[in-house]
Image (tube, helix red, strand yellow):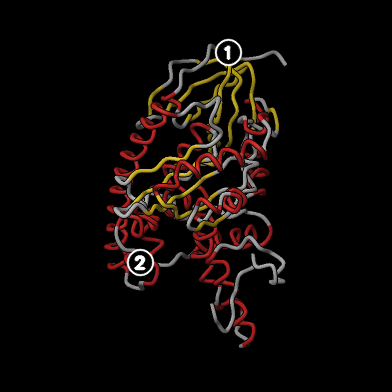
């Protein structure tokens, strides 16, 4: 459209050297340019970095290049002196206000901010981020938390419905993609369900909510090697519109074209990837012993942060591990495992592990590590990503 200027680093005529900024990142660059032009000290816009890191993390943009730099300093700001609104969200999430991570934003802070727009109006979230009043910030944080609980209920209903649809029609050997839609689904939640289905089945996934007129808004999540942006471009004749990133995208589609899109999307994935590329793979960065899992290792490991899209947490492996006692169920679907390797014992959390049947021990385990701080004491925590029966290397 006609405008004084269009700021979009993904335009082919844009010469800006980094094209993976989030929308908020583009906004921050505008503010930064204004500050430079008007000879304002950079320190004057530093308080905005807490908002920026929330955008970078929540938008799942690649945490490389300028995004990684901005996220690094944004986390410092968020942990040191967050805005009143963000501080109220941090407290309602029960987080350590001096140790907020990218994962905390992705899984706890971001969903609550987004829940307002998903379930009602985004204006509550906007007011929260702008307010300078502590009491109002607490009230708004409680409202967003309530919206988030409703979002979770809606999400569970859609996920259950979607899995039932897949049981009736989906063949993982034949179908390289998942495309599902319904008029009964809430459009604000379909992206979350798409992400869950993608992880569960390791298939590029679109979940679509259709309105009464048969026009659907869909959200997609992908696997490594399959670009949703390119897929939308190739399948454009079956869609009204679409766009996004390689790993996450959105589209608008007419209900009568959903089967056409599914076939075109499936054909695109079949023609542009090999069977081997479509299989889930765990890329182990390093095999370590339980004895090597120390706070000194954690100190070195944390220099690679912040972790996120395109800069994932290193994945470790320990082999020939024995359980020392039966797993303990934690929460709804999680397991706490108690293990021994040689003479060293460790416990670990296996998120959604209760949905799995554990293999016969001894085990090889793939895991990530994090810092856990409780009552001022730091310890190394283990998060299991995968378990198999031990194999001699």
Q: Residue under circle 2?
A: 128
Choose the circle earlier in sequence order: 2 or 1.
Answer: 2
Residue 265, picture quadrant = top right
Q: How many marks?
A: 2
What residue is shown at x 28% (from left), y 68% (from top)? Answer: 136
What residue is shown at x 40% (from left), y 55% (from top)? Answer: 90
Residue 62 vertical position relative to residue 391 in the rendered view, above or below: below
**Label ID, residue 284:** none
CA neighbours of label 1 inside 10 A, class few (<14), some (14 to 19), many (20+): some
Q: Is residue 308 visible?
A: no
Instruction: Check disc 1 and report its element: helix, strand or loop.
Output: loop
**Label ID, residue 362:** 1
CA neighbours of label 2 inside 10 A, class few (<14), some (14 to 19), many (20+): many
Position of the C terminus by quadrant = top right
CB-based contact (under 8 Å), mark 2 and mark 1: no
> Gap between marks 2 and 1, in whole Å?
50 Å
Instruction: Check disc 2 and report its element: helix, strand or loop.
Output: helix
- Residue 177 pos. (x, y %): 53, 37
Residue 283, picture quadrant = top right
- Residue 97 pos. (x, y %): 44, 55
Q: Identify which residue, 169 or 107, lies in the foreground.
A: 169
């Amino acid at each position: 459209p006609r405008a004084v200027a269009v700021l979009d680093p993904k335009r082919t005529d844009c010469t800006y050297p980094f094209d993976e900024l989030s929308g908020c990142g583009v906004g921050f660059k505008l503010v930064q340019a204004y500050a430079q032009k008007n000879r304002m000290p950079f320190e004057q816009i530093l308080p905005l970095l807490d908002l920026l890191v929330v955008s970078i993390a929540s938008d799942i943009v690649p945490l490389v290049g300028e995004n990684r730099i901005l996220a690094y300093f944004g986390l410092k700001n968020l942990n040191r002196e967050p805005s009143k609104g963000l501080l109220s969200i941090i407290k309602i999430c029960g987080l350590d206000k001096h140790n907020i991570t990218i994962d905390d934003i992705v899984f706890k802070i971001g969903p609550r901010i987004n829940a307002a727009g998903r379930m009602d109006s985004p204006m509550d979230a906007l007011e929260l981020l702008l307010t300078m009043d502590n009491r109002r910030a607490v009230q708004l944080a409680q409202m967003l938390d309530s919206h988030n609980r409703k979002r979770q209920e809606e999400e569970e209903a859609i996920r259950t419905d979607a899995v039932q649809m897949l049981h009736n029609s989906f063949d993982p050997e034949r179908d390289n993609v998942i495309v599902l839609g319904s008029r009964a689904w809430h459009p604000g939640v379909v992206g979350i369900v798409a992400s869950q289905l993608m992880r569960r089945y390791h298939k590029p996934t679109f979940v679509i909510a259709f309105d009464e007129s048969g026009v659907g808004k869909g959200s997609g999540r992908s696997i490594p090697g399959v670009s949703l942006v390119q897929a939308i471009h190739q399948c454009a004749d079956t869609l009204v519109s679409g766009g996004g990133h390689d790993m996450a995208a959105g589209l608008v589609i007419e209900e009568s074209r959903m089967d056409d899109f599914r076939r075109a999307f499936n054909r695109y994935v079949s023609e542009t990837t090999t069977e081997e590329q479509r299989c889930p793979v765990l890329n182990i960065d390093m095999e370590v012993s339980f004895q090597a899992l120390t706070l000194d290792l954690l100190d070195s490991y944390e220099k690679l942060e912040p972790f996120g899209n395109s800069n994932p947490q290193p994945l470790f492996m320990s082999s020939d591990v024995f359980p020392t006692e039966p797993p303990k169920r934690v929460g709804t679907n999680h397991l706490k495992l108690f293990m021994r390797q040689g003479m060293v014992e460790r416990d670990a959390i296996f998120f959604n592990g209760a949905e799995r049947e554990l293999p016969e021990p001894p085990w090889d385990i793939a895991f990530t590590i994090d810092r856990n701080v409780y009552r001022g004491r730091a310890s190394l925590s283990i998060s299991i990503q995968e378990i198999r029966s031990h194999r001699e290397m």
